[in-house]
Each structure stands twice: as C-alpha cells, then as structure tokens.
Amino acid sequence: MACWQSRCIEPGPGTLRSSMFHLLILTLLLTAFACLAITSERHRPAAFRKKYRGLALSIYLCAWLLLALALMIAVQTIGWALGLVIWCGHGSIAAAAVYCVLVFIQRPA
C-alpha cells in the first residue's frame, strides 16, 4: 500500500479507478489541444468557411474550458502537488499526439 499525504492507495479495485482517472484527464486534454489546433490561424481556413468564424471562437473557448476542467479534476482528485504534475505530464503527451497528427496530415502524399 502506498501512502501520500494521508491518502492511501491500495492495490486491487482502486487500480481500475486510477486508470480511468488518467484516461479521463488524457481524453480531456487531447480534445482540448485538438480544438486549439483546429482554431489556430494556420488550420482555421481548412476547417471553417467564412460564415463559421463564430463557431471557431466558440470551439476556442471550449478548448480552454476543457483545459481548466482537466486541471480541476486532477487537483480535486489527487491534490495540488501530484495533480499538477499529472496534468502537465498528460498535457505533454496530448500536445505531442496532436502535433504528430498535424505533421502527418500536412505531409504531401
């Protein structure tokens, strides 16, 4: 059993819950970074036509809300010390994944 700041994690059923927590954080961050990438100046013309510029702004704001929600979930579940570390780690993985997809899509055939 591992303990950190009076929070003990026992192996067994809690392991699946911990995995789902990490999957939730990673999914939220992946979605947020994908939305930020779609609404950037470089990728916006391909994703949205002129009449959908307002939708791009809405998606941009939703992406920032998803980033904040993921941070809130991480901090509320684990605490400030480890929650920020997990959020930054999953954020790096999600940003790298979105970057690799953008590079793959931009590559000429």
Image: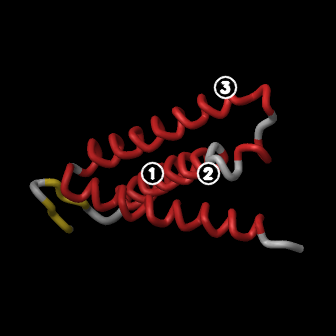
Residue hosting label 3: 54
In this view, the mark in front (3 or 1) = 3
Residue hosting label 1: 25
Dot 3, how many residues are within 10 Å of its Cα: few (below 14), some (14-19), or many (20+)? few
Q: Earlier in the sequence, mark 1 or mark 2?
A: 1
Residue 71: x and y, percent?
A: 35, 45
Separation (CA) of disc 2 from disc 3: 16 Å
Q: Secondary structure at mark 3?
A: helix
Q: Secondary structure at mark 1?
A: helix
Q: Amino acid at mark 2?
A: Ala
Dot 1, how many residues are within 10 Å of its Cα: few (below 14), some (14-19), or many (20+)? many
Dot 2, how many residues are within 10 Å of its Cα: few (below 14), some (14-19), or many (20+)? some
Q: Nearer the viewer, residue 84 or 7?
A: 84
Separation (CA) of disc 3 from disc 1: 27 Å
Q: Amino acid at mark 1?
A: Ile
Q: Amino acid at mark 3?
A: Gly
Separation (CA) of disc 1 from disc 2: 18 Å
Q: Earlier in the sequence, mark 3 or mark 1?
A: 1
Q: Quadrant of residue 90?
A: bottom left
Q: Nearer the viewer, residue 26 or 94?
A: 94
Name which residue lies at 10% across and 57% down. Answer: 5
Residue hosting label 2: 37
**In the picture, which quadrant includes the C terminus?**
bottom right
Return the mark for residue 97.
none
